Image (cartoon, rainbow, N blue to C red):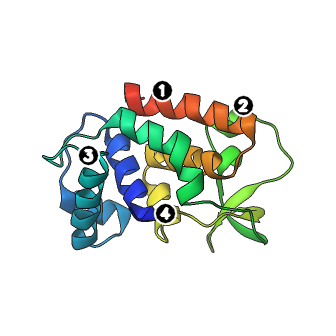
Amino acid sequence: MRPHDIVVLLKIAAKGKAPWQMKDLANELEISASEVTESLNRSVKAGLMSTSKKTLMKQALLEFLQYGLKYVYPEHPGAMVRGIPTAHSAPPLNEIIASNEAYVWLYSEGTVRGQRIEPLYKTVPSASLKDKKLYELLALTDAMRVGRAREKELALKELKQRILNGE
């Protein structure tokens, strides 16, 4: 698995029951079509996608996000930069958690100053601006990577609601 495989899977989750094609994922995520194809192949091998490459294995993805993500793609907040809020600094957690410290993805047109969190893939900030549901899923995923126990618990609850129920 590669970090952008998680981004592809979260994009599929963000689409809910809406039909999608690989070329659409590639365009919307600003990833090449061949990378999307390879990503889906790896996800099938990992048991996160069905062999038809059309059905997201939602429970398996949630288990990976809960138990494996922080070990496979760990992240430690970095220097203060300007960017797009993520983790507990972004919706929906910023409506539940009050914090003086902000976490952001570096982005030149960003409006928030905070500690830098390296996104799972370089196009995450711009792709997130185009899709609110994807943005929320990626921010919640970052909370699983860098959050404390309470933040992770809240993030997991929100991820389950969005991925399992398509909300």
Name the quarter where the N terminus is drawn: bottom left
Q: Position of residue 89 (x, y in %)?
A: 71, 48
- Upstream in the sequence, badge 1 or badge 2? 2
Task: Name the residue nearer the viewer: 62 or 46.
Answer: 46
Residue of label 3:
49
Give the residue number, with chain letter if any, for mark 1: 161
Residue type pointed to by label 1: Gln
Q: Residue at x 32, y 42 (%)?
A: 15
Task: Give me the C-alpha separation between circle 2 and circle 3.
Answer: 32 Å
Q: Seen from this angle, which residue lies furthest left?
A: 52
Q: Quadrant of residue 7?
A: bottom left
Using the image, determine if residue 61 lies above or below residue 102.
above
Query: In the drawing, what numbered circle is on residue 96?
Result: 2
Q: Secondary structure at mark 3?
A: loop
Instruction: From the image, state whether disc 1 or disc 2 is nearer to you.
Output: 1
User: Is disc 2 in contact with disc 3, using a CB cutoff of under 8 Å?
Assistant: no
Q: Residue at x 58, y 43 (%)?
A: 140
Looking at the picture, does residue 96 appear above or below residue 51? above
Nearer the observer: mark 4 or 1; the answer is 1
Q: Where residue 42 sits in the image (x, y, percent)?
A: 28, 60
Read off the residue under disc 4.
124
**In the rendered view, does 100 fall on the left or right side of 114?**
right
x and y percentages locating residue 41 in the rendered image: 22, 59
Mark 4 → mark 3, Cα distance in angstroms: 21 Å
| Local secondary structure at mark 2 | loop
Which residue lies at the image location 75% right of the left edge and 42% below the top edge? Answer: 148
Q: Depth-wise, is mark 3 or mark 1 nearer the camera?
A: 3
* Residue in the image at 26% along x and 45% along y: 49
Secondary structure found at label 1: helix
Tell me, yes or no, whether the two marked residues, 4 and 1, touch with CB atoms within 8 Å: no
